[in-house]
Amino acid sequence: MMLRVCVIAVSILATALALDNGLALTPPMGWLAWERYRCIVDCVAYPDDCISEQLFRRTADLLVSEGYADVGYEYVIIDDCWLALERDSDGRLQPDPQRFPSGIKALADYVHSRGLKFGIYEDFGTYTCAGYPGVVGHMQTDAQTFADWEVDYVKLDGCWSKPEDMDTGYPLFGQYLNQTGRPMVYSCSWPVYQEFAGIEPDFESLKENCNLWRNYVDIDDSWEEVEIIMDYFAERQDRIADHAGPGHWNDPDMLIIGNYGLSYDQSKVQMAIWAILAAPLLISTELRDIKPEYKAILQNKDILAVNQDALGIQGHRINSSAGIEIWTRPISPLLGDKYSYAVAFVSHRIDGYPYLISVNLAEIGLTSAQGYNFQDLYDPESPPEILKPDSILSIRVNPSGVVFYRATIITAL
Ligand SMILES: *[C@@H]1O[C@H](CO)[C@@H](O)[C@H](O)[C@H]1NC(C)=O
Ligand SMILES: *[C@@H]1O[C@H](CO)[C@@H](O)[C@H](O)[C@H]1NC(C)=O
């Protein structure tokens, strides 16, 4: 009898570690409509920009034809404003008939036919943030509707609901998703609503129930927003960072690279820090218009490899001094108990010249005696350098820019 109790306790403990749907073992990559396209529903004034099946079909095509799919961007995700204002006569969700005349199943089929995966948005509340029907009172039906439509990814927002109800409500919707038998990535917005209400989110429960979760504000199109989000994750890293891992990620929100707000250097910073943070990489830009140098940032394979590192360890900001920050992330391969690292030097300075920084490797945690092979990830043509723990690395960082290295541990003598 005792033994049986123990076995059950152990198995509960094991399943309590993380959501076991086999998905998002590395941070999800794809395209999400919100930051760039918001809730544009006027297809007469904005025929190319409105939230419509045409926008998502076009984006699926571009993800493939422009090489994004080849480097790992796979989810095409609708955000708010796809719904009709009323459910159908059977109480099921239905899309806006003018903007999605073929229906969501046909759109999912189209996305799948391009070799991609399809994501959708709903809200744990009476309404979505923009005022369309929410899932409350219809959770089982809506989860089944998504499965019937062959959805692969569900973002569940938290407007028009009580933050204190989310501890039970979000897991319940997740159970309904699970009961459909269709694996769907589950993106939760519950921590951000609780943090703003002064409630400390239960990260253990988040890991058990969600594949990713939004910790903080919606990103807007500016460098200030990127800085605010970086500060949020750095200042709370002792409480937040260790909850990330294969199948369960902190989400600092979309990539705004390719839009109006970031310079070329600032775009490199966002990409580097999102890789350090093991963040989901959800592009929100017009892929038709993006300039080649911004596209190259989004498709930088070495940086994507840092983001997708199989260990799934989220990095930290390890120093911030005089407007210069140093961020590191442990990555593979290992030598004994010592890691390789991604290392980012970020400048928030505005005095207009590349600022010189010199650091001793051991002081930033790189202590393997045989040293590290340093490769500048934004200058892949530059020859790699071998540096030892007592080496001094001297570099110059552009104003609101970054220098980003992979420091691969040397494993053979
Ligand atoms: C449902 O949950 C069980 C138990 O965690 C898991 O083994 C299974 O893969 C899940 N199924 C889906 C479709 O998510
Ligand atoms: C951060 O860097 C500055 C400048 O190099 C140095 O003086 C300081 O000791 C560092 N602080 C920490 C906590 O490592």
Image (cartoon, rainbow, N blue to C red):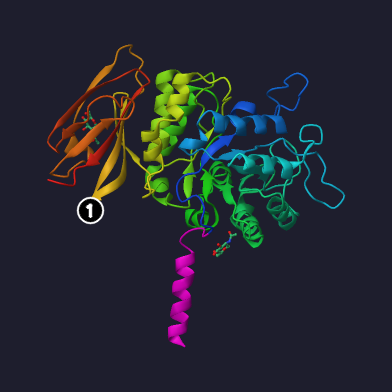
| Up/down of 91 relative to 84, above or below | below
Expressed as whole percent of the image width and height from the top left, the position of residue 28 reads: 50, 43
Using the rendered view, name the quadrant where residue 139 is placed: bottom right
Expressed as whole percent of the image width and height from the top left, the position of residue 269 reads: 39, 27
Q: Amino acid at mark 1?
A: Asp
Q: Which structural element holds mark 1?
A: loop
| Up/down of 125 relative to 175, above or below | above
Q: How many marks?
A: 1
| Up/down of 349 relative to 275, above or below | above
Using the rendered view, name the quadrant where residue 405 is placed: top left
The quadrant of the rendering that contains the C terminus is: top left
> Which span of residues is magenta-colored?
1-20
Task: Inspect this view and state whether residue 52 appears.
Answer: no
Expressed as whole percent of the image width and height from the top left, the position of residue 109 reads: 68, 43
In this picture, residue 63 sits left or right of residue 407: right
Most distant residue in the right direction: 89
